[in-house]
Image (cartoon, rainbow, N blue to C red):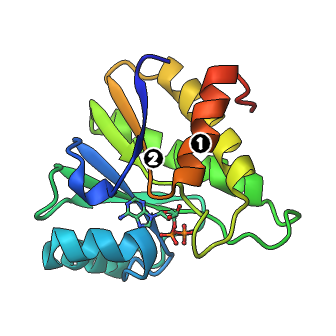
Amino acid sequence: MNKINVIQGDITKIPAEAIVNAANSSLFGGGGVDGAIHRAGGSLILDECREIRNRQGNCNTGCAVITGAGNLPAKYVIHAVGPHWRGGKHQEAELLKSAYLSCFKLISEYQITSVSFPNISTGIYHFPKQLAAEISLATIIDSLGENDTIETVNLVCYEKENQDIYSLLINNGLAKG
Ligand code: ADP
């Protein structure tokens, strides 16, 4: 638990070796945190996303790809595609978990020591915030147990509501798998 920090703020301004982006399948950028990351990081990130797209096509929901971080205070951006909330019966929970697991696969592969996550899917994709926080926290805690290199995980909440949800979960030990 001592590796996890809950922070309220703009993920593009917080130094970390890797910054996770809540991307969409096209990898072409969008609104929300995706727009902020591409604006602050500059065109290099989009160029790399375009190369990846040319190579492998769309990044499927639940999957992630990695690029450099351009002008961001980071070395890498991990572009993870979370699910659209469509009522809860379309494997949204599994797909959100898979998005976080896909990030940790890359974190292990690239031996990343610090990472910042936004609240994937809880903005434009409308995933319920409480459920998203329970899934992400449980998945992150499990993944930390299996990863030797990561030292710091920042849960960066743009909205205070998400910060409060995480803080309560951590304080009450309520994260569930
Ligand atoms: P999604 O399409 O996955 O829902 P969004 O970018 O719309 O992605 O929202 C994901 C989360 O990122 C939301 O909680 C939103 O408030 C948050 N967010 C938006 N801008 C930033 C930012 N600059 N830094 C950190 N989080 C952000």
Q: CA distance from mark 2 to mark 1?
A: 24 Å
The amino acid on which the numbered mark 2 sits, given as a three-letter code, is Cys
**Residue 52 at least partly seen:** no
Q: Which mark is residue 49?
A: none
The image quarter containing residue 71 is bottom left
Residue at x-position 45% and y-position 81%: 26
Mark 2 or mark 1: whose residue is earlier in sequence: 2
- Give the SS element for disc 2: helix
* Mark 1 sits near ligand 1, with its Cβ under 8 Å away: no
Q: Position of residue 155 (x, y in %)?
A: 45, 42
Quadrant the C terminus occupies: top right
Residue at x-position 53% and y-position 44%: 163
- Rendered view: 94 above or below 141: below
**Residue 29 at least partly seen:** yes
Which residue matches tag 2?
Answer: 103
Which residue matches tag 1?
Answer: 164
* Mark 2 sits near ligand 1, with its Cβ under 8 Å away: no
Residue at x-position 37% and y-position 83%: 28
Extreme residue toward the right, this view = 89
Tell us which disc is closer to us: 2 or 1: 1
The amino acid on which the numbered mark 1 sits, given as a three-letter code, is Asp
Q: Position of residue 86 (x, y in %)?
A: 80, 73
Residue at x-position 25% and y-position 60%: 67
- Rendered view: 172 above or below 25: above
Q: Position of residue 100 (x, y in %)?
A: 54, 46
